[in-house]
Amino acid sequence: MNRVAGAGLLVLAAVAAWLARGYTVNFIADPVGPRAFPWVAAGLIAVGATFMLLRPEERAGPSLPSGRLRPFLLALVALGLYPVLLPLLGFITTTAGVMWVLARLFGGRAVPSAAASLGLAAAMYLLFVYLLSVPLPLGRLFLAGGGG
Amino acid sequence: MSSFSLLLEGFAVALRPLNLAFALGGVGVGTVVGMLPGIGPINAIAILLPVIFAVGLPAESALILLAGIYYGSQYGNSISTILLNVPGTTSSVVTAIDGYPLTQQGKAGPALATAAIASFVGGTLSIFGLVLLAPLLASWALRFGPAEYVALMALAFAALSSFSGGSFPKALVATGVGLLLASVGLDPNSSVARFTFGELRLLDGLDFVVVTIGLFAISEVFLLLERTGAGEAAATRVGRVGLTMKELAFSGWSMLRGSVIGFLMGVLPGAGGTVSTFVAYGAEQRISDREGTFGKGDLRGVAAPEAANNAAATGALIPLLTLGVPGSATTAVLLGALMGLNVTPGPLLLERNPEVFWGLVASMYIGNLFLLALNLPLVRVFVRVLSVPRWILVPGIAALGCVAVYAVNGSVFDLFLMVGFGVAGYGFRKVGIPLAPVILGLVLGPLMEKNLRRALALGGGDWSVLVSSPLAVGIWGVTLAVLALPLVGAMRARRQG
């Protein structure tokens, strides 16, 4: 795990440094330029990652959720779909949907989870839109279709 | 004398009804988020920030609210630690050593009361320290130029990496990642677009609220998924919450000693809460443990680290407010909040925004009183919150995180970024890379780069300008010493092992 992460981070540092090589300007007033700072950052990552690669510590051993990848992926898909569906279905529907998936993953039963998700999503909508005047999308689908 | 009259003016600010309400609300929210798993003050502050910006709160009111969450969460943390043996953050791990055995012996009430009173003592005493030390440090820091600031920020990174207790190379990686994230977007000096990959929505850089909520809140959701079945909080019988005079006298000195240790360690960047609790507990054990009762449920073993923890939290505000250099993830988030409110922490803060600084100080006296009042009689009400089931709590946190991120710019793109940072944060935690240096790097990065380039521009591109003043050399010296500490420790451990 440590070696894999170290190798990945080393690649990240190299890519960042390579991308930053073109960040130059010809100001006399700015002798450092926009390139130096990303290079320093990439250098820090590279040094740390090299240590991780060469001297991995055993105590931080592999602890990936081997048998439990499914809930992780489901949660990731739900959260990843959230921004896609938000402008379409609106805040209350989308938020309640994602919350319901997560609630189910954390062992909630179907109906109480749905009730809690809908209730909380509606409460948040009212709180943010009316009390705190933070605009949240109502949903294109409902507005265009005249359904909502 | 002038400090005293300024403090009186601060009380005039803090006692305005709106600010009183914010102090009470802040410490109440702080207690709850400190107690619950998966939220914590960092997420609470990050989630509230977009709301604060949207509502347009004045800076002093916003800071009173956010600081209330910050130090209030230190109280709440001890509740779940003592009752359930579940420390919310590392800074209350030590409290569990004696706190949980007390609960098992049916003495949860006295343990909670000791924690509350110790927190009050630590919090209140360290505000005196803040009032005394902050103006001194600020007037000293007025002499700082860009070179000294670069050195000081390097010291903050070094201290956070060395004292975090984890692996030093991983802290180094985290710092680098934070600094790299900070450089995303249009470079303010030269208008060169860095790491934007042609994406216009990245030109403004990464909003730290988006990164913070992704790294902390969303990754926490993934992390909690692995432990779904475990750790449902059972309602615990609390019993009488209070202390007899005898018990108070018994642990009083421990509170005072813990406060002093905590405050001094809190002022140092990076050391902060967690280390101070270990030091305070260790010192207390050496001084008071004559009958070998420590570790088996000794009230003094709760009093010392709790006082230290709260004193350190207040002490940590000193470098934040007077130097503009935070030493921990939470104070880094507070720095981000202040900059969003157009308040620049630093030596000039006390001159330019006295109402912000002294209003905050006064509100902290009041807030600590509120906390004592909340935590002694109302602890049973708070304990109820612990029995909210995970399947409501975690989706709720995730949804609040989404709303907050969306509210920053009203942008769906930010939500994608948030999920991405959630996955990254989860990976970092799995590998053992600390998240605090990432946030510190993200917030301090732009300031550090600005000062670095200013210093080098003044010095005509000669890097030796960074060590041209005795003050800068001194700070670099301390930085090197701090960096050497873990190396020395590792060598000593190897020689013994």
Image: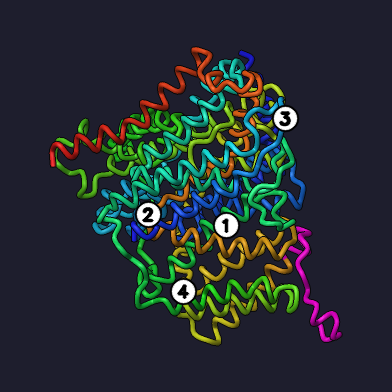
Labels 2 and 3 share a subunit: no
The answer to whether B257 is drawn above or below residue B402 in the figure is above
- Quadrant in the rendering for residue B5: top right
From this viewpoint, is residue B372 visible?
A: no
Q: What element does badge 4 sit on?
A: helix
Residue B197, numbered label: none
Residue A24 shown left or right of residue A131 in the figure: left
Q: Mark 2 lies on which chain?
A: B
Crowding at mark 2 (Cα within 10 Å: few <14, some 14-19, many 20+)? some
Q: Which chain carries label 4?
A: A
Amino acid tagged 1: Ile
Q: Pick the residue in front: B30 or A48.
A: A48
Which residue is the site of mark 2? B432
Q: What element does badge 1 sit on?
A: helix
Labels 4 and 3 share a subunit: yes
The answer to whether B186 is drawn above or below residue B316 in the figure is below
Amino acid tagged 3: Phe
- Quadrant in the rendering for residue B266: top left
Q: What element does badge 3 sit on?
A: loop
Residue B397 shown left or right of residue B355 in the figure: left
| Residue A88 colored in magenta in the image | no
Which residue is the site of mark 1? B213
> What's drawn in magenta, residue-wise?
A127-148
Amino acid tagged 4: Phe
Residue B34: where, in percent of width, then height? 48, 53
From this viewpoint, is residue B114 visible?
A: yes
